[in-house]
Image: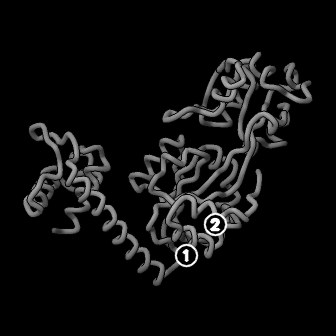
Amino acid sequence: MKLHQLRYLAAVVQNGLNITTAARKLHTSQPGVSKQLKLLEDELGFPLFERDGRQLTGVTAAGQQVVDRALRILEEVQNIRRLSSDLKDDRSGSLSIGTTHTQARYVLPPIVQRFRAGYADVDLHLHQGATEQIAELAKLDRVDFAIATGGGELFPGLVLLPCYRWHRRVVVPREHPLARERNVTLEALARHPIVTYTFSFSGRSSLPALFESAGLKLKVALTASDADVIKTYVRLGLGVGILASMALDPVADGDLAVLDASHLFAPHLTWIGFRRGRLLRGYMYEFLKAFAPHLNRRLVDQAIRAGTSAELERLFEGIELPER
């Protein structure tokens, strides 16, 4: 059994059982990948994949056990490489982050600026997308850190660390009737079309559920993943905007009326996560602390050792998270 065979196996599974795509990602040939998988199956004495002719259609039960172990082995190989790099030079390397547009546009810029000032030789890569897309990147091990709000069930293999809380705000043009409301209500919002974030593809979204529970119908004019796009269509009069508090700039958005909606919508929790079992390099700890100051190295290491989500929650019980 060779390490590259396990790497080929993982790549095929992570690319939807498409050997051609896996070979392209591995910078090798499709026949070469097929041959190594066949040699691995011959050595193990049982099939790893279900097949329809030459096409892979699924992973066998025994094959899934091999895949799970192979992924852990490959992760440890990466950890050894990270350890070597850290001992030789902790001020250079790379850091890939999967996050939403709101985080990338409104939260991360000053953090990245400070981080780059201290770690100019660390290559930073930002990958923006919806929560489901970030989860896919994390699943394929394409990012070191994932930053998102909610959707924790989509990240079963990650250690999720709570960072800060934020509230929704209602935004309208200053001449809009709601701009004169001192205490906006769900009933008032239900009378207008809404422009807000794209709803979750994988589960029930909290905003429609909130209106439904109040016996109201949510009229959606437009949903978008980009807060700037939402504000653009609010300015065009398409509807009432509902978006994250940190996506509002008092200067750039001075033409909009911003209404407090904390009495209507529960606060949201933003977290940062990384693959369980991953060896974090020194500059990765520094980025975590820059993003959320309470995430010092000691607390992060304790979170890594926490065996269950309940233990992780207890670890953060006494910490008051900041609000944005």
Looking at the image, which residue is at 51% across and 73% down? 281
Label 2 secondary element: helix
Q: Is residue 120 visible?
A: no
Label 1 secondary element: helix
User: Dot 1 corresponds to which residue?
Assistant: 282
Q: Which of marks 2 and 1 is nearer the N terminus?
A: 1
Looking at the picture, which amino acid does disc 2 mark? Leu
Left or right: 164 as drawn, with respect to 250: left
Looking at the image, which residue is at 45% across and 67% down? 278
Q: Can residue 85 be seen in this view?
A: yes
The picture quadrant where one finds residue 291 is bottom right
User: Dot 2 corresponds to which residue?
Assistant: 315
Relative to 266, say whether 145 is above or below.
below
Q: Which one is closest to the eye, mark 2 or mark 1?
A: 2
Q: Nearer the viewer, residue 261 or 224?
A: 261
Q: Quadrant of the N terminus?
A: bottom left
Looking at the image, which residue is at 74% across and 36% down? 265
Left or right: 292 as drawn, with respect to 90: right
Relative to 91, say whether 181 is above or below.
above
Q: Distance between the residues labelled 2 and 1?
A: 22 Å
Give percent across and percent down for residue 241: 73, 28
Looking at the image, which residue is at 55% across and 69% down? 284
Q: Nearer the viewer, residue 300 or 120?
A: 300
Give percent across and percent down for residue 18: 24, 43
Mark 2–mark 1 contact, CB under 8 Å? no
Relative to 82, say whether 215 is above or below.
above
